[in-house]
Amino acid sequence: MLKELNQVIDYIEDRLTDDLSLEGISEYAGVSDYHFRKIFFYISGLTLSEYIKNRKLSEANKDLLNGKKVTDVAFKYGYQSMDGFTRAFKKWSGFLPSDVIKTGVNKSSPKLSFVITVKGGTAMEFRIEEKPAFHLVGVSKRVSMQFEGVNNEIVKLAESITREQKEEMHSLQNIEPYEIVNASYNADSNFLKEEGDLTHLIGVLTTKNEISDLLEKVRVESYTWAIFPNKGPFPSTLQETMAKTYSEWLPSSDYEVINAPAFSFTKMDDHKKDYAYSEVWIPVRKK
């Protein structure tokens, strides 16, 4: 995985003046768009779009230092107007493009290089399971893509579930894990933004085919699953597990993530405030 990530960095570097798309980058990486953005974010601490923007502006800064006109530099790196380039450059650097030409002031965002770093030597608990095809059934909604913090749109979705929907989900549930799960899939692509949408489903796993119009149904084929249990303060422990899965386990494992819905579930502890047991389920295959 680290080799592939560094190849993607080189791919981006060679195309900083092109019309890069997230879909094109993830296709080159051989990973689904949404999963690749998560892997990149958890390893680098930057969104993919933020990294590309920073690299473009860093190279633009070099061009300005070399005496190129602001207008030429703006169009070279894909900005359609001088105002747009000036705003982006000032937000990134803290000074105007004209200041670079006048005073030689500069800022840089270096090219990334990924290496394995062992953090604390703590073993990560996981298990691998084969699972037959099943359906995710529940309530779903297009929500804003968000890799950190509480997504209020998902909170509202959970609050909207009716008693009838809950009863039907309970009656359909017939395959492990026998829990209410949160699944995400069908992320937007073709643009360099993290503000895109994805479909989030709150529901259960079932092998049954007949459901009412009250629920959505998404088929998931037979896959291998990497499962990461965790227990501790919620939601920080779950978020830390998700980050370590993508930033530490995947790059150093013999598995790669595939383009299928990933999901998780959480069971709150009745005796400890804000404490929970959770599991993260990610579809994978052997490299």
Image: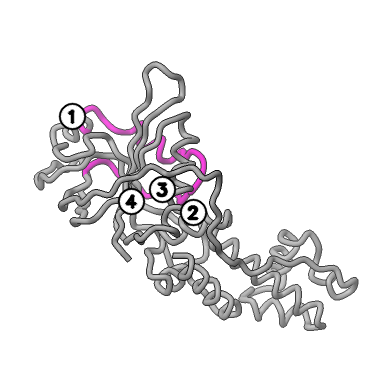
Element type where label 1 sits in the image: helix
**Residue pictured at 50% horizontal, 35% vertical:** 236
Distance between the alpha carbons at the discs numbered 2 and 3: 24 Å
Q: Earlier in the sequence, mark 4 or mark 1?
A: 1
Give the camera-side residue of 212 and 117: 117
Which circle marks residue 282 in the picture? Answer: 4
Q: Reading the chain from its start, which is encountered first: label 2 or label 3?
A: 3
Mark 2 vs mark 4: give the one in front: 2
Please provide percent x and percent y for residue 72: 72, 82
Q: Give the percent coordinates (x, y) of residue 58.
A: 70, 70
Q: Is residue 28 magenta?
A: no
Write down the region rendered in magenta: 137-165
| Residue 143 badge | 3
Residue placed most toward the observer, 124 or 16 = 124
Question: Residue 151 colored magenta?
Answer: yes
Q: Residue 204 occupies which quadrant of the picture?
A: top left
For marks 3 and 1, give the CA distance.
24 Å
Q: Name the residue under label 1.
A: 167
In percent of width and height, residue 120 lies at: 55, 44
Image disc number at residue 247: 2
Give the vertical position of 15 relative to 96 (above or below). below
